[in-house]
Amino acid sequence: QVQLVESGGGSVQAGGSLRLSCVGSGRISSITDMGWYRQGPGKQRELVATITRGGTTNYADSVKGRFTISRDNNKNTIYLQMNSLKPEDTSVYYCKADAFDYGGVRHYSWGQGTQVTVSK
């Protein structure tokens, strides 16, 4: 089983910055794609950014130029640096990983989420 734990959420004013982290643990043989998603009040969960094991990134148009995703493969960890935050970025942010365990079983795992609140 693969567990993901997010941290780094909080409350900031518009224009501020936050850095989220997500650490994978368990019987992990390898993690391929990882990403950040978010779900605002009354909204569907949406993609924020993804990153492959080789470092190729993809961003939602709404966060391009403001957010940066990165990863440390040795630590099974991804990060999301969020700058120039806007009130519409207020959401619960979830980490997702596509991982294989030592038995070769594939896992699509989600973290429990971390709240980000941006005030005007």
Image: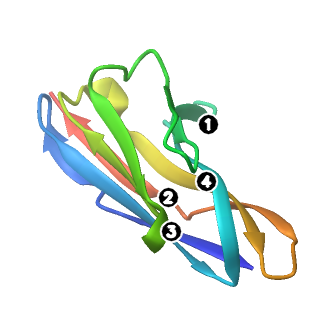
Kindly identify the residue that appears in the image at 87 percent across and 73 percent down: 104
Amino acid at pointer 3 = Asn
Which quadrant of the figure has residue 102? bottom right
The picture places residue 60, in percent across and down from the top left corner, at 49, 22
First of labels 1, 3 by sequence position: 1
First of labels 4, 1 by sequence position: 1
Label 2 to label 4: alpha-carbon separation? 10 Å
Write down the residue under mark 4: 96
Q: Secondary structure at mark 3?
A: loop
The picture places residue 27, in percent across and down from the top left corner, at 69, 84
The C terminus: image quadrant: top left
The picture places residue 46, in percent across and down from the top left corner, at 59, 32
First of labels 2, 4 by sequence position: 4
Label 2 to label 3: alpha-carbon separation? 17 Å
Left or right of 34: which side holds 29? right
Which of the two marks, 2 or 3, is nearer to us in this view? 3
Which of the two marks, 2 or 4, is nearer to us in this view? 4
First of labels 1, 2 by sequence position: 1
Write down the residue under mark 2: 113
Write down the residue under mark 3: 76
Kindly identify the residue that appears in the image at 58 percent across and 44 percent down: 52
